[in-house]
Image (cartoon, rainbow, N blue to C red):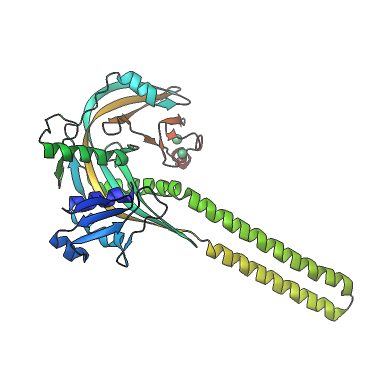
Amino acid sequence: MELRAFFTQLLSRHDCLVEEVGDAGLRVLFPRDIQESLRVGELEVFNMPRGDGQSLSLVHGGRDFIEVLEPLAFSAGLFSAVAFPRLTFPVKDPDGFLASHLTIQNGVFRLKEARPGRCSYLMVHFRMVATADTRSERLVAVTVNERTRTIPVGMATQLPYLFEQGGSKERDGVGAPGSSADFTVSESLETASDPRLTLPAIREQAQIAAREIFHDFINNLNRRLERDLTRLQQYYLTLAGEIEKRFQKKGRDPEERERATSRMEATKADYLKKIRDARDKYALEIVMEPVSALCVELPVTMMEVVLQRRKESRLVSIPVNPITRSLESLVCGKCRKSVLNFHLCDSLHILCPACFPDCPACKKKP
Ligand SMILES: [Zn+2]
Ligand SMILES: [Zn+2]
């Protein structure tokens, strides 16, 4: 999510009045209690350009304002929850829907049953910071279905629109029952499972997201390291060549021979040290810090699907998510990326095209 949108949502939720000032600014009127807790004035203008920029740091009044906001993100409780009990996305032709979303490269599938169900999701926003000789910061949301462990790809991006719809309907007083945007905010949901059980899966997905987000950053880092190493190598090869030449000319003199040997050793040691320095300079550290967690409860269409390969078969539950209006993704048994186009190993574990046929689950068995 864009920092500007996140900032607006978070502050609005805490009764701040957020207004746009041109394309690059936000004017915020803070209620008294927040003025005190965040140590800000009643009216502050933040410089925040629109768009998903490279850097997401927000320095305001000499302070990193994202850090300042952290207590707000947590103050609603680490696991604040929201439910959309009447959000519907009827799947008229479940077989056709499934066929248009799911592909098994080396097997078949069959819909056993499509029935209404409910699922709860854990959505965590991470602030991710990659640091080497330069720095990049991003805000990323990761969502996992707590019941099926499927991934509702794109749900975090769509969710704010639902809140917006709900908000305006409430104000206009036309929030008719059954309208898609009805939602209730509650601290605990009956059907919600323990979010802590979902955290390992959340962390896995966050790591995958970090690799994708910082892909260019990491590539750029590796390119520069490669370039520095090549230069070092060329420089020291030339040096070594000169020492060697001199040795060829005057190598018969024992004193000269000793001098050349020690110079060569010193040059080699220097070269190894410079390589270590270059590697240190470009050493990458990625820090992922959760800034908010939301539990979302949704009515879904649960597809009970039989996966089949040769004579083996296996049943999986794959929900149709009413927010993304799409089938939720399964997870590759090796790289943990979300997939809807995959291979099956002989024991019917799901593997993405890049990981197949290397199944870690089958390898573990004696
Ligand atoms: Zn994979
Ligand atoms: Zn397997």
> Residue 308 sits in which quadrant?
top left
| Residue 182 appears left or right of 62 | left
The structure residue drawn at horizontal position 26% and vertical position 31%, both measured from the top left corner, is 322
Q: Which of the 4 image quadrants contains residue 107?
A: top left
Q: Residue 98: where, in percent of width, then height?
A: 35, 23
The residue depicted at 20 percent of the width and 50 percent of the height is 12
> Is 256 situated above or below 347?
below
Nearest to the observer: residue 41 or residue 343: 41
Q: x, y percentage for residue 21? A: 27, 52
Percent position of residue 202, x then y: 33, 47
Question: Would residue 116 appear left or right of 127 to someone viewing this image?
Answer: left
* Pick the front one: 308 or 16: 16
Q: Quadrant of residue 235?
A: bottom right
Q: Is residue 28 left or right of residue 218?
A: left
Q: Residue 348, percent across and down?
A: 42, 30
Relative to 53, residue 259 above or below: below
Seen from the viewer's position, the closer of residues 354 and 35 is 35
Near-viewer residue (171 or 22) = 22
